[in-house]
């Protein structure tokens, strides 16, 4: 299992690809990364500027010996309903947006792209007929995106288990069904398992992660590692947390072994607060890397 890092830590602090990769490689000692769409110009994958940025990022990664594994949707996209917007024109635009992300994956030579796929509005989620129609259409759009991913040479597309029930994949049984329904697509959709989200959705400190590790996945999930506790989706680091409350790195490491997910990639997805002292960010990330390196050894 390879430990990597999502580049969301760099948002509004480091913009140049070579600066980000230098931190990943030289200061954190990590050999794999996941590029966040939030790092792109205006967090928009559709522009010529973003295509050029990805080329520069891929070149910097290659020079430093860092694998650019995947491209991930990020916070800017998460603030939208994407493929499940109530408005059809907005859904069409979101599908075109996702196609542009897939193209960026091809340019970068990444194996995967994806993340947040959409959010049902409260009116649609509460109406069984509307919800069923929305999910049927989502499946069709995901199938079309899979066809496009095949032309760009991607291995998988990613859907994330989010922390809101109206977002598909946030509940275990829906995530299992979604993966199974798309397993034979031209490029399969793979779960990107954020370990913090089930914990954040829990009402108390039960082991909310155990059922996810015990489920029968067709493709070993990718993991995103972030500290959260019940009732709070924090995306915090693991350098100074109570291991008895919230996400426990040791329990996650043990569960990975028990689940026999040997091919899983793991990406630290820590989002430092904008008001955090700039000179404290990299040391916090370094300590977080050290925590996971130790428990995964």
Image (cartoon, rainbow, N blue to C red):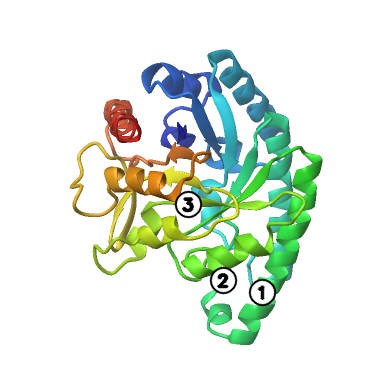
Q: Could you tell me which secondary element the residue under label 2 belongs to? A: loop
Callouts 1 and 3 close, C-beta under 8 Å:
no
Q: Residue at x 81, y 41 (%)?
A: 151
Residue farthest top in this picture: 63
Residue 81 in sight here:
yes
Callouts 2 and 1 close, C-beta under 8 Å:
yes
The image shows residue 88, relative to residue 216, as above or below, that is below
> Residue 97: x and y, percent?
70, 50
Q: Could you tell me which secondary element the residue under label 1 belongs to? A: helix
Quickly name the residue at label 3: 193
Q: Could you tell me which secondary element the residue under label 3 belongs to? A: strand
Instruction: Report the mark closest to the observer, 3 or 2.
Output: 3
> Residue 116: x and y, percent?
56, 55
Q: Residue at x 30, y 28 (%)?
A: 290
Q: In the image, 294: left or right of 182?
A: left
> Residue 135: x and y, percent?
65, 72
The image quarter containing residue 35 is top right
Q: Residue at x 58, y 79 (%)?
A: 124
User: Which comes sooner in the sequence, label 1 or label 3?
Assistant: 1
Distance of mark 2 from mark 1, alpha carbons? 8 Å
Quickly name the residue at label 2: 120
Distance of mark 1 from mark 3, alpha carbons? 23 Å
- Between residue 178 and residue 232, name the one nearer to us: 178
- Between residue 221 and residue 237, name the one nearer to us: 221
The image quarter containing residue 155 is top right
The image shows residue 172, relative to residue 46, as above or below, that is below
Distance of mark 3 from mark 2, alpha carbons? 20 Å
The image quarter containing residue 102 is top right
Quickly name the residue at label 1: 134
User: Which comes sooner in the sequence, label 3 or label 2?
Assistant: 2
Callouts 3 and 2 close, C-beta under 8 Å:
no
């Amino acid at each position: 299992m390879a430990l990597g890092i999502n580049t969301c830590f760099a948002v509004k602090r480091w913009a140049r690809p070579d600066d980000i990769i230098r931190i990943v490689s030289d200061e954190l000692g990590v050999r794999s990364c996941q590029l966040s769409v939030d790092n792109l110009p205006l967090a928009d994958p559709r522009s010529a500027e973003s295509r050029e940025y990805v080329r520069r990022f891929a070149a910097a990664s290659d020079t430093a010996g860092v694998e650019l594994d995947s491209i991930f949707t990020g916070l800017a996209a998460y603030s939208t309903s994407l493929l499940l917007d109530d408005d059809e024109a907005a859904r069409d635009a979101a599908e075109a947006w996702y196609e542009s992300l897939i193209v960026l994956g091809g340019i970068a030579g990444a194996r995967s792209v994806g993340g947040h796929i959409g959010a049902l509005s409260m009116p649609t989620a509460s109406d069984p007929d509307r919800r069923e129609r929305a999910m049927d259409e989502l499946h069709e759009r995901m199938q079309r995106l899979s066809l496009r991913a095949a032309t760009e040479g991607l291995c998988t597309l990613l859907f994330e288990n989010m922390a809101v029930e109206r977002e598909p994949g946030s509940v275990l049984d829906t995530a299992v069904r979604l993966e199974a329904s798309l397993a034979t697509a031209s490029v399969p959709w793979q779960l990107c398992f954020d370990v913090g989200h089930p914990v954040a959705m829990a009402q108390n400190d039960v082991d909310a992660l155990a059922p996810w590790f015990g489920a029968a996945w067709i493709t070993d999930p990718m993991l995103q590692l972030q500290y959260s506790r019940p009732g709070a989706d924090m995306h915090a680091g693991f350098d100074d947390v109570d291991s008895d409350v919230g996400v426990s790195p040791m329990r996650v490491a043990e569960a990975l072994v028990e689940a026999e997910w040997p091919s899983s990639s793991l990406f630290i997805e820590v989002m430092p607060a904008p008001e955090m002292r700039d000179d404290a960010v990299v040391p916090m990330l370094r300590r977080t890397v050290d925590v996971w390196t130790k428990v995964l050894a």
